[in-house]
Amino acid sequence: MTRELAQVGTPIGPFRAIVVDGALVTAGFLGTRGRARALRDSAGVHDVLAEYFAGDIDALEALAVAPQGTEFRQLVWKALREVRAGETISYGELAARVGAPLAARAVGSANATNPICLVIPCHRVVRSDGTLGGYGFGVDRKRWLLRHESRPGGLFDDAKRPASTSRRLSSSFGTF
C-alpha cells in the first residue's frame, strides 16, 4: 500500500489530501490561512488540485476517491460527485436522488462527515430556500468555492447579482 500526501496553496488557504494507492481517502483545508509548501504525489492529485484552483473547475472529476463510511453515506457521496461544478442542490433534492426523499437530515449528516472535501463537493449543497447553510471549513470558503465554480447564468454569476451584493462578496474573499 502506497500512502502519500498532496498539498497545494490556494487563495482560501492550504489544502491537503491523503492519497492511498492513487485514490483520495481524505482531503480538506488546513486550519491555517498562510502559505503551504507544495507536496506532490505520484498520482498527480497535487497537479489536479492546482488546475482546479487555477480555473479548470472540472479538473476534480478525474480524481479517484475511496472514502470510508456506511453504505448510506457512500450512496450520498457518490450522488454528490454527480453534482456538476457551477450547480447547487438542496438537501431534500439530494435525499430524493439517493432514493430516500424523507431523509434530508440524514443526507445533511452524511454531507457533514464527508472525508474528501471539495472532490466530493459537499459545498454544492444549499438549503431549500437557496441560502448557503453551513460548511465545515467556513461559509466564506463555501461562498468562494461556489463563486469560483460559477458559470454564466448561475447562482454566483456577477452579471446577475446586484452591484452592492457583488462588492460585499468580493470584500469577504479578501480575508483569505
Image (cartoon, grey):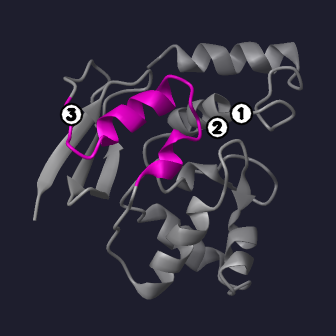
SS of the residue at dot 2?
helix
Residue 59 visible at all? yes
Residue 105, position in %: x, y? 61, 75
Q: Mark 3 near mark 2, Cβ–Cβ under 8 Å?
A: no
Q: Mark 3 near mark 1, Cβ–Cβ under 8 Å?
A: no
Give the mark nearer the N terminus: 3 vs 2.
3
Q: Which mark is residue 40?
A: 3
Residue 47 sits in quarter:
top left
Q: Residue at x 73, y 12 (%)?
A: 167
Q: Quarter of the image for the C terminus: give it.
A: top left
The reply to whether the magenta stretch includes residue 40 is yes
Residue 67, position in %: x, y? 35, 68
Q: Quarter of the image for the N terminus: give it.
A: bottom left
Residue range of the region highlighted in magenta in the rendering: 39-63
Query: Which residue matches tag 1?
Result: 150
The amino acid on which the numbered mark 3 sits, given as a three-letter code, is Arg
Residue 148 sits in quarter:
top right
SS of the residue at dot 3?
loop
Q: Is residue 56 left or right of residue 7?
A: right
Q: Mark 2 near mark 1, Cβ–Cβ under 8 Å?
A: yes
